[in-house]
Amino acid sequence: MTQFGKIDRAFFDERIAPNLGGVREDVAVGPAHGIDFGVIDVGGRTVAIATDPLSILPALGFERAARFALDLVLADVAVSAIAPTHLSVCFTLPPEMTDEQFATVWETIHAECRDLGVAVVTGHTARYSDCSYPWVGAATVLGVGDPEQVVRPDGARPGDRLLVTTGPGAETVGLLATLFADELELSEATLSAAQERLEDVYCVRDALTAAAAGPVRAMHDVTEGGLAGALCEMADGAGVRFEIDRAAVPVKPGVEAVCTHLEIDPWSVTSCGSLVLAVAPEGVDAVREALSSRGTLVAEVGRVDAGSGVVVDGEPLSHPETDPAWDAYADLLERRER
């Protein structure tokens, strides 16, 4: 059976990591499990760089779908604490996408990039016969900044405190409740609360706000593998132990109800918009206040100790083998087509 989502770590370690082309001294951070960006040193400046697929879901409306797709791409550079500055975007459009629909997508991307100070520097746009929604291309983001600014997801140190924004499951719940409302046998109030979670999927400004308020020692966005995956990747990369209090982790309305209904673990599903931050003790209050002033839900959920792994309420937490959001999406789609 084909496993959807990112390739597993074993394949990455065996087939990808040993085969990375030429060796260059200017590559300060290259591909690694759990790190979503690379870093190049150029003339005393740092260039943080990341590449991601572009996903457009017409059912969200083209404006909202475009903003969602762009934020996901920009976030992988923003979590480096270097503000995104340049964008290269490739669109391989499905034949049924009209010029007017694409114009909405492009104008939304332009407006958001203008607001963030991101320049579109190159790209490619065309329609091809075998292309289909939601995967309509890919983009590369660069952030040019000071080498001293860079925050890595593997930078946590013993003594740091751990913060989580938004909480687990928001993206998955928001998307599934919006795309498959008729297939979910839930009350109108629960569905409405779940659908509102789509407003929680944006984290670029949160990442930059936290980094500016810091000191932030490590930062990771919660994507495939969910909160459990992000915590495990950060602890493993830094060679430290994360002690987590489950009750302290924030959970937005609608998340538990939808996840229980679908029999999926909210800690294991992708949740764009949520961040895990390791913050030096003296910076915790400043980071929390800065994020709260933006209206972002943030909570202190644990600490970093010497050791290894992630422990939640005294029990070890493992990295999810797969992200159950993929199967939940497939099951609901099958339910609709019956």
Image (cartoon, rainbow, N blue to C red):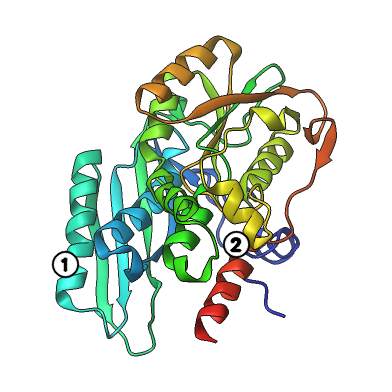
Residue 278 x/y as whole percent = 60, 26
Whether tag 2 and tag 1 are in contact, CB under 8 A, the answer is no
Which residue is denoted by mark 1 in the rendering?
103
- Residue at image location 25% in from the left, 44% down from the top: 118
Which residue is denoted by mark 2 in the rendering?
325
- Residue at image location 63% in from the left, 20% down from the top: 161
Q: Nearer the viewer, residue 109 or 188?
A: 188
Amino acid type of the residue tagged 1 in the rendering: Ala
- Residue at image location 38% in from the left, 83% down from the top: 131
The kind of secondary structure element at disc 2 is helix
As drawn, 121 above or below 102: above
As drawn, 138 above or below 224: below
The kind of secondary structure element at disc 1 is helix
- Residue at image location 18% in from the left, 64% down from the top: 104
Residue 239 x/y as whole percent = 75, 33
Amino acid type of the residue tagged 2 in the rendering: Ala
